[in-house]
Amino acid sequence: MRLVMYPFKEIEAKWQRRWEESGTHRIDTSHPERHKYYCLVMFNYPSSDKLHIGHWYNYGPTDTWARYKKMQGFRVFEPMGYDAFGLPAENYAIEKGVHPAHSTAENIKQIRQQLKAIGAMYDFEDKEIDTSSPQYYRWTQWLFLKLYKNGLAYRKKAPVNWCPKCHTVLANEQVIDGRCERCSSAVTKKDLVQWFFKITRYADALLHGYKKIDWPEKTVLMQKNWIGRSEGVEMSFFVERSSKTIDVFTTRADTLFGVTYLVLAPEYPLVNELTVHSRKEKVAAYVEEAKMETEIERASIIREKTGIFTGSYATHPLSGERIPIWIADYVLTSYGTGAVMAVPAHDQRDFEFAKKFNLPIRQVIVPEKAPNNEQAYTGEGKMVNSGSFNELLSRDGRERIADCLEKEGKGKRKINYRLRDWLISRQRYWGAPIPIIYCKSCGEVPVSEDDLPVLLPSEIDLKKTHGSGESPLSSIPDFVNTPCPQCGKKARREVDTMDTFVCSSWYYLRFPSPHYEKGAFDPKAVKNWLPVDHYVGGAEHAVLHLLYARFITRALYDLKLIHFDEPFMRLVHQGVITNKGVKMSKSRGNVVNPDALINQYGSDVLRMYLMFMGPYEEGGEWNDNGIRGISRFLTRIWKMASEDCHHQKITANSQELKRIKHHTIKRVTAEMERFHFNTAISALMEYVNYLAKARRQIVLSDWQKEMETLFLLIAPFAPHLGEELWTMAGHKRSVFDERWLSYDRTALEEEEVTVIIQVNGRVRGRITLPANSSEEVLRENALNDKRIQKWLAGKEVKKVIVARGKLVNIVI
């Protein structure tokens, strides 16, 4: 059966043209706004030529929220741009045999047209940014220089994550379960000289910032765990017949007397020196084998433990006991000191290792209940086998042992972090060049800010350089060779480019003034509009973009360049749209094309269906029948607004009409505030059903008021149709210049209520009474009801419990 729809194509084309011609979405950010509202969605990544439904699910509902806030009286700023640098865009260009600048520009052109079809409040003329344009990455390079000059950017040789397929370095955050987040190839280790941002300096500040922001609890927890703050003691074990010490960090100093061996990471700098001659060959082989494994694999709790003895020993700092020194791949250099004091009785990994290699297991903490000898006991208890610390509670013992170590100069209290500095070097072409020059006489020389941007060379054959493992820029002599800015001698440019997350770590600052040439951002515009009030994007960025943006914001705040230290005050994550039970992707062949749906059903229908299909933060399963249902719903509203209808001279039950209207306003408003679009739309559907049934019992003037209420409520969800209906109702100005409706609390009160009567907790009857009846009236009516009296005959009433407006429970 053919679906008859309202004329959405004409309506949507008309209003998109009007919005663009009138400049209704343009915001002057140069002036302060008393009621400003900066609503931002994570910007688009134009690595391919089309938006898909997942993008729509991010952008459409967020625009509905922005329009709702505008109707509440806020001056809403909702910009859009393109996160255009990066590995996927470069690989796409190589695949298509074109230059990344050309393919990216073409992709942006097509995506911009798709974005316009959404009907969102984006200002493409004046408030659009492209991170791959020199006008933008000039200031990304400026940001690098600011961090460099303030000790927050540095270069060092380090073992890094290397993707053999993408031929580039990956930050720890870009390795998922030991694989590249982009291509899923197994990640290996490689020693390279790389650039880092010193995010670790801000570990505590980042942890303290959560108090002032409204973010999902899960995201906050993920960041806290990634930062990994732990308080403990760092102590020294002296190596026998050597002046060397092995420093270890522990959060459980109370277990110190349970140490039966030390474990070093295979990469620990003293491994070769500590290994006795007779074991060097075997130890070297083990170390090489460990280098082939990822940190994720090595840290796995279910993996069988491996290790090798060095042949050397150290001395226990308090007992003087001789402690063997082992090497094991479950110890990592990326956390703590790269050495661990092994307490097998009270750490499960140490327990499994000791069992396998037949090492002593000494219990030093006794729990209240008998321990399970088949696993380590990791809880609190009473200290035993711990010399003078015996009988202390473990929590007290921690402090006493820490005091002792500090007093004897063998240890100190310390705070450790799991967080490591942000690795930003990438051996790829399509990124912002790092503005550093290397001179044999002067060393590292930063490019002058006046000489920015350091431009990417336009002439390059990426297919020739792809797969070499070297940065493609190193193959271009005209780019590499340059005079030293300080001495004028021959020098070489840095050939690595910056991680694309550097570009997105500050883009929200640029949006209010994208054409500003005197700095990365106009200080006045930033003062007027920042921080971002509402930010929407994927939860997969919890320890990537979201953490990096917080770090950059705090660094700029400390440099007194901005007035705030948290970028996003409220954060919402959208869920995932699935098709046939799995996430949509081209490789699975289950992608739904939004262009075809817009052509068939219209932009408003697609937007509303995406919001209706399930809780926004959870997403849902795509269903073609569902989108047809939304199309019928909007068509029904169109017909109700368009068709003539016979009306009564007097509205029947006007009080009920008023109550349902205000109840709907209350529900839609409450659900919108919680970002629960699906239940807000459900409330609108119930309201439309009621109006459709009651329309012939409503006087014409009341009907017109009810329809205007409906038009105002539906407008943020279906903006094109909302504008059209509001104009049809005789209004000259935009529906989005009208104020969002408030509800009348007194109108919500029902005239009569049905009260349940229970006897000893069982329902025995119901009575209908005025809604404002007192407890005494409810009590008397319940006791005197004929249906209830038969249950009370010959019984003593001990108590009558009244819940006003709901029930009366008689206890006999």
Image: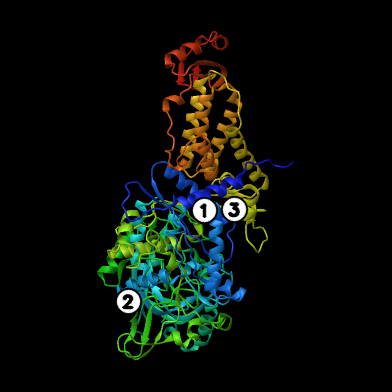
- Label 2 element class: helix
Question: Can residue 242 be seen at all in this image of the molecule?
Answer: yes
Of pointers 2 and 3, the one earlier in the residue sequence: 2
Lateral position of residue 113 relative to residue 200, left or right: right
Residue pushed farthest right? 1
Dot 1: within a 10 Å radius of its alpha carbon, few (fewer than 14), some, or many (20 or more) residues? many
Of pointers 2 and 1, the one earlier in the residue sequence: 1
Of pointers 3 and 1, the one earlier in the residue sequence: 1
User: Label 3, on which residue?
Assistant: 577
Which residue occupies 46% across, 33% down? 666
User: Label 2, on which residue?
Assistant: 450
User: Label 1, on which residue?
Assistant: 59
Lateral position of residue 185 relative to residue 740, left or right: right
Type of residue at label 3? Ile
Q: Quadrant of residue 254?
A: bottom left
For the residues marked 2 and 3, what is the alpha-carbon distance in whole angstroms? 47 Å
Give the camera-side residue of 177 and 616: 616
State which quarter of the image contains the N terminus. Answer: top right
- Label 1 element class: helix
For the residues marked 2 and 1, what is the alpha-carbon distance in whole angstroms? 37 Å
- Label 3 element class: strand
